[in-house]
Each structure stands twice: as structure tokens, then as C-alpha cells.
Image (cartoon, rainbow, N blue to C red):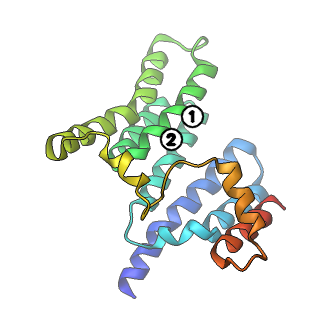
Amino acid sequence: TEIYTLSLHDALPISAALHHLVATDLHDRALAERTACLASLAPMAFVLVMGYTEPLAGLLAVVVFWAARQKRWHWAAVAGALGGALRPSGILLMAPLLWEVGRHFRSAGRSDRAWMSAAVLSPLAGTVPYLLWVQGVHGDWALPYSVQRKSYLRGSFANPIARVGDAVSKIDDGNHLLGLRGLWVLIFVV
């Protein structure tokens, strides 16, 4: 129970940060409450109370989004670097940062432009040292990405829209796991 309680406390900051992000960015408290609840109740939320890096990675991702939307580029840079260092997929935080920077770069001053650039590159700066370590130890810097394609893990890449359609079509097909995913997709769409 002590481990479970500690893990549960690790998951709560994500909900609080999501609530704050939606409330400050969209000025809609009701939507912010629904967002926090859905993030906590979604089928994949169970990893937020286990001994994985998802709670911290999720929190850092939300901080990246919040900081970028608030034009607090120094916070976005720090959270992006930590997110990139925490998980190899953290490098994907570069995409939303690039989007936000692209919206404001022309009108920004010199100092802000430097922080904007640092923010966009920060997930890469956080990920590269880990990938260099993997290269040194295993001889394949891309191993953290390629290992996920093993059939006993996630399998090969798939079209996400086709996967959702497949899950929805399995709702009453006897395949309970895929059917449950399809049911959750329908609930979220509604």
C-alpha cells in the first residue's frame, strides 16, 4: 500500500497541471475539470500509478505546453531538456515547441529568440546524451526506438486511424481487449 500511495501521489501533478493548462489557456474551468478527470480515468492512466516514468514525463510535457503557450521560453527549455533526458520519445516535444515558436518568432526580441531557439532544441539536447550512451554500450544509437517494433512489445508501425477503426469494429466481436479500446474511443468522441 505504501508503494501504491506514493505512485498515486506521482500521478496527481499531471491532473493538476492539465487543469491549470486548460484553465489558463482556454479560460474554461469546466473543460479544465473534465480534462483532468479524463486524463486520470483514461484506460492508459493505470501507468500513472505504477513505477514507470510516465507520471514525470507527462508532467514535463504539460509544463512544456503551458510554458510555450505562456511565452515562458526558459521554462519550456528546462522542461523540454528534462523530458528529452527522461525518455527517448521526449524528443517529440520539439514539434509543438517549433509550432509555438513559429507563431511568435518574428515579433520576438533578440533575447526571446535565443530562449525560443533553446526551447525548441532542448528535447534534442536532453535525448542525445542518452542515445550516445546507448551507442557506446550497445553499438546502436537507435535501439531505444527500434526495440519497440518487436512483436512482443508494440509491433510494427500502424496507421492510428485504421487501428482505432479496428478497435471500434471489435466492440461486439468477442475480442474483449480490442472491443474495450473501441468502447473507450466511442466514449471519448461522445
> Compared to 142, does 154 lie above or below?
below
Q: Position of residue 38 (x, y in %)?
A: 68, 65
> Is residue 48 left or right of 127 when viewed as pictured?
right
> Is residue 145 left or right of 183 when viewed as pictured?
left
Q: Residues within 10 Å of mark 2 (few under 14, many from 20)?
A: many
- Name the residue furthest right: 190
Q: Position of residue 180 (x, y in %)?
A: 69, 74
- Name the residue furthest bottom: 1
Residue 83 makes an appearance in the image: yes
Report the residue at 67% width, 76% height from top: 175
Q: Amino acid at mark 2?
A: Val
The answer to which image quadrant residue 127 occupies is top left
Report the residue at 52% width, 12% height from top: 109
Quadrant where the N terminus is found in the figure: bottom left
Which circle's residue, 2 or 1, is located before the other in the chain? 2
Q: Position of residue 118 (x, y in %)?
A: 40, 25
- Labels 2 and 1 touching (C-beta < 8 A): yes
Q: What secondary structure is found at the residue carrying circle 2? A: helix
> Is residue 78 left or right of 155 when viewed as pictured?
left
Q: Amino acid at mark 1?
A: Pro
Q: Residues within 10 Å of mark 1 (few under 14, many from 20)?
A: some
> Compared to 107, does 128 lie above or below?
below
Quadrant where the C terminus is found in the figure: bottom right
Please give the residue where the numbered disc 2 appears in the rendered image. Answer: 64
Please give the residue where the numbered disc 1 appears in the rendered image. Answer: 96
Foreground residue among 16 and 84: 84
Foreground residue among 59 and 132: 132
